[in-house]
Image (cartoon, rainbow, N blue to C red):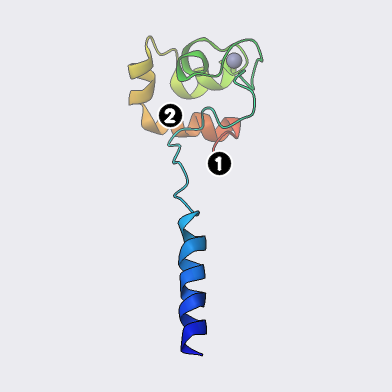
C-alpha cells in the first residue's frame, strides 16, 4: 500500500519532467507556420517589414503609428503599437 503510493508519486514526478515551460513570445511574430507576412505574403514577416515596409497593413500603420522612420521609433510608441496589433487582430 505504502509502496503503491510511492510508486505513484515516482510515476507522477517522471511524467511531470516532460512538461517544460512554454516559450514566451512578447510580440506576435513567427507564430505562423509560414515565415511569409500574413498581410501581403510578399516578404518574411519581420518587425522591420510589418512596421516599416509592408503594404498590406499600410492603412492601419498610418492610422496608429504614422510613418515611423526607423524600427526603434515605431517600437517606442507602445500605445500606438498595441492599437496597431489589436486592429490587425494579430494579438493572441
Ligand atoms: Zn507584409
Check disc 2: other Cα within 10 Å, few if <14, some if 14-19, many if 20+. some
Which of the pair 59/72 is nearer the observer? 72
Q: Is residue 86 left or right of residue 6?
A: right
Residue 67 placed where, x, y %? 44, 12
The residue at the point 52 percent across, 62 percent down is: 15
Q: Identify residue for label 2.
A: 80
The residue positioned 46% from the left and 71% from the top of the image is 10
Q: Is residue 70 above or below residue 12?
A: above
* Alpha carbons under labels 1 and 2: distance apart: 17 Å
Q: Nearer the viewer, residue 92 or 65?
A: 92
Q: Position of residue 36 (x, y in %)?
A: 62, 18
Observer-nearest residue: 33 or 78? Answer: 33
Among the two numbered marks 1 and 2 on one chain, the one whose residue lies closer to the N terminus: 2
Report the residue marked by disc 1.
92
Instruction: Name the residue furthest bottom.
Output: 1
Q: Is residue 76 above or below residue 89?
A: above
At x 45%, y 79%, the residue is 6
Coordinates of residue 76 in the picture (x, y in percent): 33, 25
Task: Please determine whether, in this image, residue 22 is positioned above or below residue 72.
Answer: below
Mark 1: secondary structure: loop
Determine crowd level at label 1: few under 14, some 14-19, many 20+ residues with C-alpha closer than 10 A: few
Amino acid at each position: 500500500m505504502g509502496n503503491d503510493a510511492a510508486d505513484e508519486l515516482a510515476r507522477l514526478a517522471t511524467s511531470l519532467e516532460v512538461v517544460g515551460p512554454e516559450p514566451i513570445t512578447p510580440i506576435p511574430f513567427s507564430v505562423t507556420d509560414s515565415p511569409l507576412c500574413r498581410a501581403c505574403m510578399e516578404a518574411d514577416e519581420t518587425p522591420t517589414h510589418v512596421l516599416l515596409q509592408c503594404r498590406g497593413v499600410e492603412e492601419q500603420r498610418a492610422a496608429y503609428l504614422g510613418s515611423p522612420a526607423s524600427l526603434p521609433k515605431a517600437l517606442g510608441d507602445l500605445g500606438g503599437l498595441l492599437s496597431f496589433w489589436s486592429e490587425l487582430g494579430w494579438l493572441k
